[in-house]
Amino acid sequence: MTTTAPAERTVHPEKSEASRTPILRTILLRQETWLLAVVVLIAVVASIRNPNFMNPDNLVEILRGSVIYFIMGCGAALLVIGGGLDFSVGAIFTISALVGTSLISQGVPIILGILAALAVGALAGVVNHLIVTYWHVPPIIATLGTFFIALGLSALITGGNDVVPLPADFMKLGQGSVLFIPNVIWYGLIIGALFYFVLERTRFGINVRAVGGNRQAAVGNGLRVVRIDLVLYILAGVTAAIAGMIYSARVGAGQVEAGGSSVTLVVVTGVLIGGVSLLGGLGSITGVAVGAVLLSVIDNALIVAQIPPQYNNVVVGAILVGAVAVDHLRRKQLYKPR
Amino acid sequence: MSTTPALELRAVRKSFGPVAALSHVDFAAYPGEVHAIVGDNGAGKSTMIKIVTGIHRGDGGAILVNGEEMELRHDASQSQDRGIAVVYQDLALVECLDISTNMALGNLPYRWGVFLDRKRMDAEAAAALKDLNARVGDVRTPVGLLSGGQRQVVAIARAVRMNKPIILLDEPTAALGVQESAYVGRTLDRLRADGKAVICISHDLEFVFKHSDRITVLRLGKTVGTRTTADVSRDEIISMITGATPADTLQEAS
Ligand SMILES: Nc1ncnc2c1ncn2[C@@H]1O[C@H](COP(=O)(O)OP(=O)(O)O)[C@@H](O)[C@H]1O
Ligand SMILES: [Mg+2]
């Protein structure tokens, strides 16, 4: 037995084959390696164009910008690792934030408003799960449907108006800082650590990998796959709701235009470029974190270094395609019939 | 032989849409015997096992474990709870998980309610494999990197490790070489000595005659009959498989 962390083993199976697989290849097959290289490349280009890019304030801003994607990415990644997919997260973000902020702006205690938002996220997850499991609608279609429904409901509830003003106490949650680190970044760290722990160190996390890695085998071994699916869709919904509330607190409004399709796309892209396999089983929270940071770096470089968006889009697209190609290599190694 | 079968099937039926996979299966296996199930491809052997373990739900008939009827509608974890371990024909291993995780799947050890107990998982897996004298390398190797034979050994070790009174094996030697098959044979002998009811589907008649106490033949979804291995010839079994010998009328069970 070796001393390598178990997490590494399940996520990067090629590692345990060190004797047969060259180390260089191992590193190159690791999603984080590529992503970090791209992050560095963009950072170098951006700081040449504007030295302020490397300014600590701006680096904090980059992290702050990545948190929303990362938190949603944690829930979405777990779901994808478990063999599911959720395209509705962007709209769950919107509707739960609007419900939560509306209640808070009408004088409901802040904590209850937040819980209500989380409940909306959880409910959306339950609905997704029911459609996928009992109506046998493929996840991509089912969640696309709930995406539109949630977005439509968001506009109906609010009449198309943003929810303002919000109490200062609520906004403080999204704008303050502790130990010089913005609250928002703390939220990301805490939720990320929680998801990392759940995925790598708990029975539930291993069962999720088993369900996504080989559903039939999971059933054969007595795993309650339908219940696991349900929890995964709920987690994807709840993390979207958390992100929605954090965003609202940060900007000081429940925004009708926030979230939606662009957030769904960014989250799904972030999860995939983070090395989570669309076919299930493989992926890590650290990969998702680096993926989220990369997307935020790109957003930031656009503003700070005025790197035009078309370049960024090309870069994101190329990384996405590259990530899926690398995933194919990993899977070919593991899933080839013998 | 004790009087109550460890596992008994009475007139079990199962159709997949228009395909009648099982039309009438009677079967009884007792503690302390190795009971082989043979039959042509498509005879319904795997379907029969999957009905017992709850992967498929039988359309009719009865399944009894130690004389107690088990609901036809149950899931794999319930069959485990009733004391049944199984090695599926497709092995039911998760390729992206390592050997020790696969061996503990469905029953992962943990500490303080939540923490996965990796050390115990690794130690138990290594011990179970050593017990079988299996050489599959580091227990942290993902199963997807193993050869077909190694996977089969892992799947068998997993079922043995569960230490249930009833163990079902579906073609456990299909991907194995001569030496590995011999290991499996010895494992069956040991399980019998431990008083377990060992039910083994196999194509390999030589293996069946060497290691089984009784043989049940399935043909086109029906039980043709059960014979004591010592009292039956290979040719008789083959003619039961091919249909040259007609099915026994009304089994003692019904
Ligand atoms: N999931 C399924 N759906 C439809 N037909 C099936 C399914 N599983 C088995 N069958 C059919 O049932 C019959 C028995 O199959 P099986 O039990 O696998 O046979 P054996 O294991 O004896 O070779 C075959 O005709 C097979 O095609
Ligand atoms: Mg079969």
Image (cartoon, coloured by chain):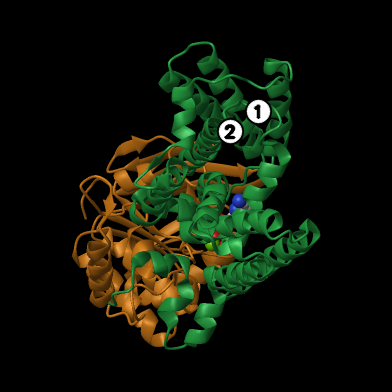
Chain colours: A green, B orange
* Mark 1: C-beta under 8 Å from nearest atom of ligand 1: no
| Residue B233 seen anywhere in this rendered image of the structure | no
Which residue is rendered at x = 60% and y = 37% of the image? Answer: A133
* Residue at 66% from the left image edge and 49% from the top image edge: A266
Identify the image quadrant of residue A9: bottom left
Residue A21 position within the rendered picture, expressed as x and y whole percent measured from the top left:
49, 86
Type of the residue with mark 1: Gln
Q: Residue at x 67, y 22 (%)?
A: A162
Q: Is residue A299 above or below residue A232?
A: below
| C-alpha distance separating marks 2 and 1 | 9 Å
Q: Which is more foreground, mark 2 or mark 1?
A: 2
Image quadrant in which the N terminus of chain B is located: bottom left
| SS state under label 1 | loop
Q: Is residue B184 left or right of residue A182?
A: left
Q: Which residue is mark 2?
A: A251
Quarter where residue A200 is shown: bottom left
Q: Residues within 10 Å of mark 1 (few under 14, many from 20)?
A: many
Image quadrant holding the C terminus of chain B, namely top left
User: Between B156 and A27, which is closer to the camera in this rendering?
Assistant: A27
Secondary structure of the residue carrying tag 2 is: helix
Q: Is residue A252 visible?
A: yes
Extreme residue in the front direction: A51
Dot 2: within a 10 Å radius of its alpha carbon, few (fewer than 14), some, or many (20 or more) residues? some
- On whether disc 2 and disc 1 are found on a single subunit, the reply is yes
Contact (CB < 8 A) between labels 2 and 1? yes
- The residue at which mark 1 appears reads as A255
